[in-house]
Amino acid sequence: MKLFFLTIATALALSASSLAGELELVQTIELKGKTGVLDHVAIDGKRDRLLLANKANNTLDVIDLKSGALVKQKTSQTGIQGIAYAADLDKIFVGLGSGLFNVFDGDSYKIVKTLRFKDDADNVRYVPSTHVVYVAHAEKMLAAVDASTFDVRADIQLPDTAEGFEKEKARPRLYVNIPGANLVALIDTDKNEVVKTYPTTMASGGHPLVLDEANHRIYVGCHNKPKVLVMDTESGKEISAADIAGGVDDMWMDSGRKRLFASCGDGKLIVLKLVDADHVEPIESIDTPKGARTCAYAAETGRLYLAAPRQEGKQGPTILVYQVK
């Protein structure tokens, strides 16, 4: 009976929060393209532009956020997936399902370099402090590429295919989700090798990963038994978990506002409160189009950009812009 009342209390709290609203939809930007999957999103803060991996259309889409308009589509980006923008180098790094890894000039959008991996170049992340861009690719590898010279510094063998990953700023430690093996791998980026693995048991199929370096925590968004796991970076121990919607593919943390934002392909945008270092709590669930699973977030403006696939009756996909209240 006690558990029953706690469940109702949690539901009522979430409902009340939803009515108050953590996020407000302030803009809808219409794009062009086919029906199908959209992949990752990056922000070019220098030009106030959004960069979208329009996988359904095989294009890199460039959206001007001031005018709310699509300004360019770079074609022939077959199976475009991962994307990262390096502000200090003014370069855009793009991973393609074909195994190609394209580097674009951030101003002209011309390709300045193409690398070829064996297959399926997917998630991409740039680390400004080391000028290294990491790209996950087949088979079960994570490449470390010099973002200035485009030389491959290392190709790191993983236990299985990688999903989301993030590197610490203070230490040579990178955490990467390995959903096929139900674990998080810890990579020593000086040695360029996996040095530890942290099993996930409360839930599995980890995709996005967010690092809270100050509190020695990682947040893992899981597909199987959809949850956000809270894990200790030092011991690898699972501390707690919170339920979310299915199909999560991106998560972002706003440490100042003590919030996590999780975009879920089942048609929900979940806002979670960072209660303390050991616990997160879902406080708002926003209905979104099915398949809207990727987003980007700018903590300095409190704006979240959700990529929504083309819906019936529309000319193309949309970017839904939410403002933190």
Image (cartoon, rainbow, N blue to C red):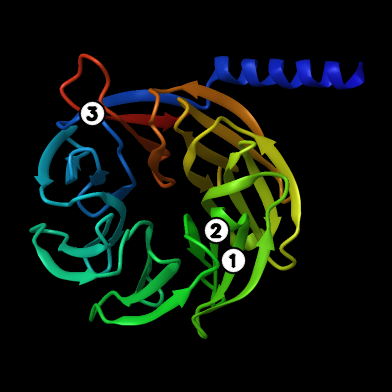
Q: Position of residue 317 (x, y in %)?
A: 24, 29
Residue for point 12% across, 58% down? 107
Q: Are marks 2 and 1 in contact (CB under 8 Å)?
A: yes
Residue 268 picture location, percent across and down: 49, 26
Characterize the local packing of mark 3: few (<14), some (14-19) or many (20 or more) Cα atoms within 10 angstroms: some
Name the amino acid type tagged 1.
Answer: Ala
Tags 2 and 3 touching, CB below 8 Å: no
Q: What residue lies at 41% left-to-right and 36% top-to-bottom? A: 293
- Amino acid beneath label 3: Thr
Disc 3: which residue: 35
Residue 197 relative to residue 250: left or right: right
Q: Earlier in the sequence, mark 2 or mark 1?
A: 2
Mark 2: few/some/many CA within 10 Å (<14, 14-19, 20+): many
Q: Which residue is mark 2?
A: 178
Q: Describe the element under mark 2 as helix, strand or loop.
A: strand
Depth check: 305 or 187 in front? Answer: 187
Residue 279 is at least partly visible in this image? no
Q: Identify the image quadrant of the N terminus.
A: top right
Check disc 1 and report the residue beneath it.
Answer: 185
Where disc 3 sits, the SS reads: loop
Q: Earlier in the sequence, mark 3 or mark 1?
A: 3
Question: Splitting the image into 4 quarters, where does residue 323 fall?
Answer: top left
Q: CA distance from mark 2 to mark 1?
A: 7 Å
Task: For mark 1, give the secondary structure.
Answer: strand
- Tell me where residue 168 appears, x and y as whole percent: 54, 68
Name the image quarter holding residue 153: bottom left
The residue under label 2 is which amino acid type? Ile
Asked whether the beta carbons under mark 3 and mark 1 sit within 8 Å of each other, the answer is: no
